[in-house]
Image: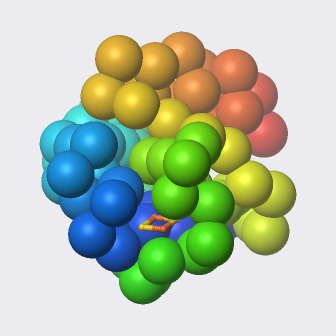
Amino acid sequence: MELVICIGSSCHLKGSRQVVERLRQLIEEANLMDKVALSGTFCMGNCQKGISVTLDGKLFSLSPENVDGFFEDEVLARG
Ligand code: FES
């Protein structure tokens, strides 16, 4: 699985750094380090809805508050 997080300035201001850190933690806890590739990208053109994250090309709008739910529903579900 490929998880790409926007680190453009708008998403950065909304907390993309926290989202990256939290995702990294969750991936480690779930022992998915060899299954999930985490990377960053610049603005995805979705600033208004950011923090923009794509999972295998599908776009999601995350926040530091909903990142755990996203991980459970989308990442773990695909496991
Ligand atoms: S800065 Fe993240 S979508 Fe524009």
- Quadrant where the image shows the C terminus: top right
Colouring style:
rainbow
Residue 8 in the image: x percent, y percent? 34, 73
Q: Residue furthest front?
A: 48
Is residue 10 placed above or below 75 in the rendered structure? below
**Quadrant of the rendering where the N terminus is positioned:** bottom right
Residue 79 visible at all: no
Q: Residue at x 71, y 33 (%)?
A: 74
Looking at the picture, how far across and down is residue 38, in whole percent? 43, 68
Residue displayed at 74% across by 54% down:
59
* Left/right of residue 44 with respect to residue 6 in the rendered view: right
Task: In this rendered view, identify the residue nearer to me: 21 or 28.
Answer: 21
Give the percent coordinates (x, y) of residue 48: 55, 48
Above or below, comparing residue 18 to residue 63 in the picture:
below
Taking the spot 27% from the left edge, 69% from the top edge, the residue there is 9
Q: Residue at x 40, y 31 (%)?
A: 63
**Where in the figure is residue 5, as x and y percent of width and height?**
45, 63
Q: Residue furthest bottom?
A: 42
Q: Is residue 55 left or right of residue 49?
A: right
* Front-lying residue, 27 or 52: 52
| Residue 54 in sight | yes
Total numbered circles: 0
